[in-house]
Image (cartoon, rainbow, N blue to C red):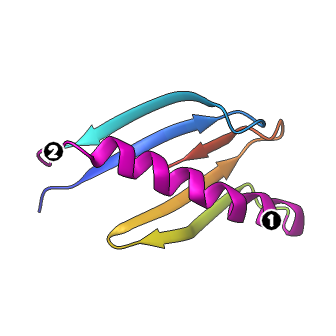
Amino acid sequence: MASTACFMIVSRNDIPIYEAEVGTATKREDAAQLHQFVLHAALDIVQDHAWTTSAMFLKSIDRFNDLVVSVYVTAGNILCAC
């Protein structure tokens, strides 16, 4: 089964610092925009969870169709989303 993933690092002001698409699936034209939209939509959920838990890895924060968002929150509030 071919799959693709999007990895994004986002600053504490919700500004993307780094973005990469990895995987073996054929790339769709709108895949990059869809991944970016889903990741940014999940940021609101991440910000709410970051204040209620001491965990740095937030697994399966949000889902959209077959896309699952997991986030690692650093001590400096930098988000690494996949």
Q: Residue at x 34, y 73 (%)?
A: 65
The spot of residue 42 in percent (x, y) is 60, 60
Q: Which residues are magenta?
A: 25-53
Q: 39 left or right of 74?
A: left
Q: Secondary structure at mark 1?
A: helix
Compared with 78, 71 (above or below) is below
The spot of residue 10 in percent (x, y) is 64, 36
Front position in the image: 51 or 27:
27
Q: Amino acid at mark 2?
A: Thr
Front position in the image: 42 or 30:
30
Q: 1 left or right of 22?
A: left
Give the quarter of the figure containing the N terminus: bottom left
Q: Is residue 33 magenta?
A: yes
Q: Secondary structure at mark 2?
A: loop
Q: Is residue 34 magenta?
A: yes
Q: 19 left or right of 29?
A: right
Q: Residue at x 26, y 46 (%)?
A: 30
Cα distance between the residues tagged 2 and 1: 33 Å
What numbered label is drawn on residue 24?
A: 2
Mark 2 or 1 closer to N-term? 2
**Residue 43 sits in quarter:** bottom right
Q: 45 left or right of 70?
A: right
Q: Which residue is mark 1?
A: 48
